[in-house]
Amino acid sequence: MPNLPASSGDDEASASLRRTGFSAVVEPGEVAVVRLHGELDMATAPLLDDTLTSVLGDGAVEVVVDLASLTFLDSTGISVLLGAGQRAGEVGTGFRVRAPNRPVRKALHLTGVEEILGLEPDRPLAT
């Protein structure tokens, strides 16, 4: 599944994606990897939610969200990750979050969700 941009008719969402550089690139498979880039915030969280919903519906055994290239994460983005983790558990799909950089790790730590998300080491997945 390729990078999923906002619909062309939604000018505000498109402008936000350009401003933040956000993308969610999916590498499908039995273990689906979702690589996040740019800023995950209130404006871009719906794109991630749609992407993760789609990946969870594709029948992967496990979903890995790689945060190595994510430069910013707010509470809305954290909420999307938590919701996806919960949905994955409900359907029996593994869900892992890995490789946050220092600012993103700090946001996850300050909100107390590191353990809930099963946060893994800073080492990113091989490209």
Image (cartoon, rainbow, N blue to C red):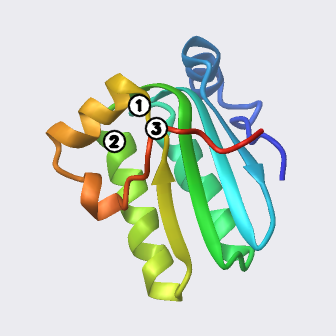
Determine the residue positioned at 27% across, 41% down. Answer: 108
- Which of the marked residues, 2 or 1, is nearer the chain's N terminus? 1
Q: Nearer the viewer, residue 56 or 19?
A: 56
- Tell me the distance, in whole angstroms, between the alpha carbons under discs 3 and 1: 21 Å
Whole-percent x, y for residue 18 in the image: 64, 15
Q: Nearer the viewer, residue 23 or 66?
A: 66
Determine the residue positioned at 73% across, 35% down. Answer: 5
Whole-percent x, y for residue 16 in the image: 55, 20
Type of amino acid under label 2: Thr
Mark 1 nearby-residue class (10 Å; few <14, some 14–19, many ≥20): some
Type of amino acid under label 3: Asp
Q: Is residue 67 left or right of residue 30?
A: left
- Tell me the distance, in whole angstroms, between the alpha carbons under discs 3 and 2: 22 Å
Type of amino acid under label 1: Asp
Q: Nearer the viewer, residue 48 or 59?
A: 59
Determine the residue positioned at 55% across, 33% down. Answer: 68
Q: Which residue is mark 1?
A: 41
Callout 3: helix, strand or loop?
Answer: loop
Mark 2 nearby-residue class (10 Å; few <14, some 14–19, many ≥20): some
State the count of labels: 3
Callout 1: helix, strand or loop?
Answer: loop
Q: Which residue is mark 3?
A: 122
Pointer 3 with pointer 2, Cβ within 8 A: no
Dot label at residue 76: 2
Above or below — where is 59 with respect to 50? below
Mark 3 nearby-residue class (10 Å; few <14, some 14–19, many ≥20): some
Pointer 2 with pointer 1, Cβ within 8 A: yes
Whole-percent x, y for residue 114 in the image: 27, 52
